[in-house]
Amino acid sequence: MKAVVYQGFGSPDILRYQDIDKPTCGDNEVLVKVRAASVNPLDWKVMKGGPFIARLLLGLGKPKIKRPGVDVAGQLEAVGKNVTDLKPGDEVFGTCVGALAEYATSKSAPGMKSALVLKPANVTFEEAASAPVAGLTALQGLRDKGRIQPGQRVLINGAAGGVGTFAVQIAKSFGANVTGVCSTGNVDLVRSIGADRVVDYTQQDFTQGAERYDLILDCVGNHSFSEHRRILNPRGVLVGIGAPADVPMLGLLAGLTGALVLSLFVSQKLAVFMARVNQKDLTTLGELMATGKVKPVIDRRYKLSEAQAAFRYMEAGHARGKVIVTPES
């Protein structure tokens, strides 16, 4: 089968589109015929090796994971004997390892369900593949960490990105009044997906505005907790999920530690987290898409053989919504 692989850490130039053995399905696995996958910032950061401390997990010399891609949508070709919630022929979406391939496997621990759920019939494979990482991050950040409530004023910083486009729509589905922050070229997009108000960061620093918010979901990380506190209500919450790519890891950790300590002594709170994949929340995303409350924003589409170009575009940091990769056939 055809797949995208890499043998070392580095730029998108290390990616190779080549023939490899088709994976087999273990007892606790399912084999997916990939119909669509999407690229996340985490994918290219892992490919580059991340900060040195991350190499302890990724591999010091050579990467332990040599096939990129996590978000997947496709049709099940085979199901391991210990997997009881899915069957061959099911159209599914969720996460796996090595989604940028014609076939991929998704594993579940014995007695546990897989990281895949049934795809709603009225949701395309491309739409479904765009949802897992970005959608789960937005959903869990707003609902679980931000405790979003109907009628609250919510600000999404980075509203035109992969997580941001999901967050605007999910916040609206909870009945919130949503402000999106984006660049000039994305103002119309963010307004079209439901934002009640849009702030163009090239024209206005949202942390200096007169509006006050109950919840801020920060997908960018370009302002400190202290700056955010100025526009948070007395018991408001800042949920941080993003960080600038050009800031050294030690600087990020120092700033985050200081912010977390400060949040212990003030009424406004800071929460940071990484999304966790589970079938219940994937099903919730599927329902939101099926009912039209969330419509994934797809920026560009690439063929599997064009993976280098897809990663270069994602790495540039200007993607509007999601970047999709599909097999050649």
Image (cartoon, rainbow, N blue to C red):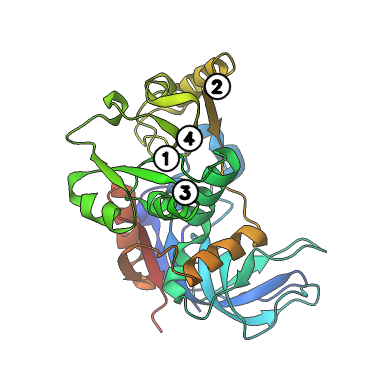
Q: Earlier in the sequence, mark 3 or mark 4?
A: 3
Q: Tag on residue 75?
A: none
Mark 3 lies on residue: 42
Q: CA distance from mark 1 to mark 2?
A: 21 Å
Amino acid at the residue labelled 3: Leu
**Residue at figure coordinates x 47%, y 48% from the top left:** 42
How many residues crowd mark 4 within 10 Å: few (<14), some (14–19), many (20+)?
Answer: many
**Residue at figure coordinates x 53%, y 51% from the top left:** 139
Q: Earlier in the sequence, mark 1 or mark 3?
A: 3
Q: CA distance from mark 4 to mark 1?
A: 13 Å
Marks 1/2 in contact by CB < 8 Å: the verdict is: no
- Which mark's residue is nearer the viewer, 3 or 4? 4
Q: Is residue 85 above or below residue 88?
A: above
Q: CA distance from mark 2 to mark 4?
A: 11 Å
Residue 189 located left or right of residue 217:
left
In which quadrant will I find the C terminus?
bottom left
List the single residue furthest toward the front: 151
**Secondary structure found at label 3:** helix
**Secondary structure found at label 2:** helix
Residue 278 located left or right of residue 44:
right
Q: Position of residue 310 (x, y in %)?
A: 33, 61
Mark 2 lies on residue: 260
Q: Is residue 202 above or below residue 324?
A: above
How many numbered discs, if any? Answer: 4
**Residue at figure coordinates x 29%, y 52% from the top left:** 190
Mark 1 lies on residue: 154
